[in-house]
Image (cartoon, rainbow, N blue to C red):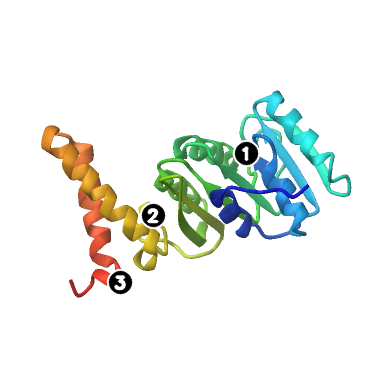
Amino acid sequence: MRIVLSKRLKKVASMVTGNSIADVGCDHGKLGAYLYQNKKINKVINMDISKASLDKADELMSSFKECETICRVSDGCDALNDNEVDTLVMAGLGGTEIAIILKRAFAENKKYKRYVLSPNRHPEKVRKVLLENGYGIVEDAMVKEGGIYYVVFASEKGAKIPSNNEIYYGINFRTDPVFKEYCINRLEHLNTLLLTHTNAKGIKEEIERLNSAKKELVDDKNN
């Protein structure tokens, strides 16, 4: 049985390093199964607040008996020990939620060599928490799937400290064609909204940030 991942999760998988992962909010556990099947890891800790999801993950991993598999009902990283795995993964949760989980883990002195994160919204909140705790960004990507844009990034201790625009849009936004497409489409959408929401401070602030980032795009420097 070949495990097939979405485009987003494939990008997440590509950023995993080391022999073990904890997948927080693992849903049905396909990421760990894929990584083991492709000889990238030999241990996975699947974690979810839903026991029903963990049961599905456990059932899937039963096809890969050689992989050390642990399933834990957990709110965030609560059931994970410090440095218990090489890579901590959180994908598909909101940025606010991931930021809260990270803050709680750092407060309990739980740290991991690499974090691979893909928040649904507000990636800047996640990057800021990492920076506050000495973690920079080593890899950053935007993928488009089903008409939706997703960010995926990896963080390690002492890595690149992003600029303000990079905190919002990733360390590679200047040369990323997917981000360029996102930027153009998002600006068009926000400017349309502004026609009927003229006093919307949040819309204006986002337009200002995107225009600032757009000026830094490599292809736009001479435009």
Q: Does residue 14 appear to the left or right of 164 in the view shown? A: right
Q: Does residue 138 appear to the left or right of 174 in the view shown? A: right
- Foreground: 86 or 71? 71
Circle 1 residue? 108
Q: Does residue 209 appear to the left or right of 122 in the view shown? A: left
Q: Amino acid at mark 2?
A: Ile
Question: Alpha carbon of mark 3 to alpha carbon of mark 1: how far?
Answer: 42 Å
Quadrant of residue 56 within the rendered picture: top right
Q: Earlier in the sequence, mark 2 or mark 3?
A: 2
- Foreground: 77 or 214? 214
Mark in front: 1 vs 2 = 2
Quadrant of residue 110 within the rendered picture: top right
Dot 1 and dot 2 residues touching (CB under 8 Å): no
Q: Residues within 10 Å of mark 2 (few under 14, many from 20)?
A: some
Q: Does residue 62 appear to the left or right of 73 in the view shown? A: right
Question: Alpha carbon of mark 2 to alpha carbon of mark 3: how far?
Answer: 18 Å
Residue 198 can be seen in this image: no
Question: Alpha carbon of mark 1 to alpha carbon of mark 2: how far?
Answer: 25 Å
Name the residue at 21% across, 56% down: 211
Q: Earlier in the sequence, mark 1 or mark 2?
A: 1
Q: Which quarter of the figure is the C terminus placed in?
A: bottom left
Name the residue at 70% across, 54% down: 86
Circle 2 residue? 167
Outermost residue on the front side: it is: 1
Circle 3 residue? 218
Q: Amino acid at mark 1?
A: Glu
